[in-house]
Image (tube, helix red, strand yellow):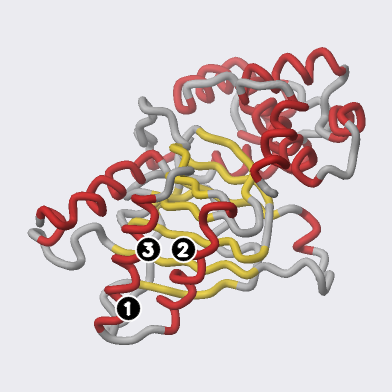
């Protein structure tokens, strides 16, 4: 599967890019770039794809995506329905690892920042319980000018390095080894899968979307993603279930049905396989940490 190389726009005044997005469909395609990307979701929720990781993102989350790590954020459908209470508010920072000079990160005082950037090559997720103050600093970067802008970025990276609740997203063996000729196929697969994960998607159906034969699709998907398509679609379903568990508005059986599983035993099996705990344990741990 081939992500698209994205060219990040920069001006002649600032050494790195900082902006605020209010539209849920900005860069909502599988892409990568040499710049490190720092994202703060002040408002918004959906599903994030970072390398080979699929998980929900929620209001207040912060994600640091390292250089050339493919990523993709898909907001929930409700954010595209122009409801006044469902608006996106996302702060996005792009910067080159060495924009402050080749020697800067090698200074002994900057070891924590260097380590954070190294960890970001697998994607770093900071949940809202730990990231509220970091989010405020990120917002200040957008409005700052001059050297204050660089100082704030250093403060953010230092705060992330000191955060006790940051999670690595992509697996340790993930590599971006995609072919240029495949750059559009992943978007078709992802978009169709996200739109239809609640129903059964046959092999013939998804192969047609990818414009290859069913037999070729299996080999193609496994060789590029290091997982089967059935595993991929179940990860999307479990990611959706996690969001419903966190919202705490439906019971476990209703969440099972809403997430596209045919029976509760399959739901329970795949949830524990992917998340390492039962649905109820996952919900309790989140609600406990949210207090």
User: How far is the residue under mark 1 from the one under mark 2?
Assistant: 14 Å
Work out whether residue 183 or residue 42 is closer to the camera in this orientation and state it. Answer: 42
Going 86% across and 29% down the picture, which residue do you hit? 252
Is 153 drawn above or below residue 247 in the view shown? Answer: below
- Disc 3: CA contacts within 10 A as few (<14), some (14-19) or many (>=20): many
Residue 4, compared with residue 137, is above or below; it is: above
In the rendered image, residue 213, in percent from the top left (x then y), is placed at 62, 22
Mark nearer the N terminus (1 vs 2): 2
Circle 1 sits in a helix, a strand or a loop, which is it? helix
Left or right of 189, for residue 124: left
Q: Residue drawn at (68%, 54%), measured in percent from left and top?
A: 45
- Mark 3 lies on residue: 156
3D distance between C-alphas at marks 2 and 3: 6 Å
Q: Is residue 163 left or right of residue 44?
A: left
Residue nearer the viewer, 42 or 99:
42
Q: Which residue is mark 1?
A: 149
The image quadrant that residue 78 belongs to is bottom right
Label 2 sits on a secondary structure element that is: helix
Q: Between marks 1 and 3, how big is the CA–CA gap?
A: 11 Å
- Residues at badges 2 and 3 in contact (C-beta under 8 Å)? yes
In this rendering, which labeled residue sits more in front, label 1 or label 3? 3
The crowding category of the residue bearing disc 2, from other C-alpha atoms within 10 Å (few below 14, some 14 to 19, many at least 20), is many
Q: Along the horizontal axis of the image, is 5 left or right of 286? A: left
Q: For residue 132, which quarter of the picture?
A: bottom right
Residue 288: x and y in percent read 69, 40
Residue ID for mark 2: 134
Q: Secondary structure at mark 3?
A: helix
Query: Which one is nearer the viewer's eye here, 97 or 159?
Result: 159
- Mark 1 / mark 3, whichever is N-terminal: 1
Discs 1/2, front:
2
User: How many other residues sit within 10 Å of disc 1, few (<14), some (14-19) or many (≥20)?
Assistant: some
């Amino acid at each position: 599967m081939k992500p698209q190389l994205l060219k990040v726009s920069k001006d002649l005044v600032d050494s790195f890019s900082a902006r605020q997005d209010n539209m849920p469909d900005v860069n909502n395609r599988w892409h990568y770039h040499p710049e490190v990307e720092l994202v703060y979701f002040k408002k918004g929720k959906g599903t994030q794809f970072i390398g080979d990781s699929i998980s929900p993102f929620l209001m207040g989350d912060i994600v640091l995506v390292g250089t050339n790590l493919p990523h993709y954020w898909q907001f929930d459908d409700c954010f595209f329905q122009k409801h006044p209470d469902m608006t996106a508010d996302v702060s996005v920072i792009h910067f080159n690892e060495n924009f402050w000079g080749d020697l800067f990160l090698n200074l002994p005082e900057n070891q924590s920042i260097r380590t954070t950037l190294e960890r970001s090559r697998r994607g770093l997720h900071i949940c809202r319980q730990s990231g509220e103050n970091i989010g405020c600093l990120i917002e200040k970067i957008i409005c700052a000018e001059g050297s204050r802008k660089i100082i704030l970025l250093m403060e953010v990276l230092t705060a992330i390095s000191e955060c006790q609740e940051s999670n690595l997203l992509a697996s340790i063996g993930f590599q971006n080894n995609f072919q240029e000729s495949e750059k559009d196929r992943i978007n078709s697969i992802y978009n169709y899968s996200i739109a239809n994960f609640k129903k059964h998607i046959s092999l013939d159906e998804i192969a047609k979307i990818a414009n290859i034969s069913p037999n070729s699709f299996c080999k193609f998907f496994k060789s590029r993603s290091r997982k089967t398509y059935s595993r991929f679609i179940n990860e999307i379903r479990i990611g959706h279930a996690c969001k419903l568990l966190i919202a705490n508005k439906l019971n476990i059986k209703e969440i099972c049905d809403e997430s596209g599983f045919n029976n509760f035993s399959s739901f329970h099996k795949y949830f524990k396989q992917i998340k390492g705990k039962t649905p109820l344990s996952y919900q309790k741990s989140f609600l406990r940490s949210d207090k």
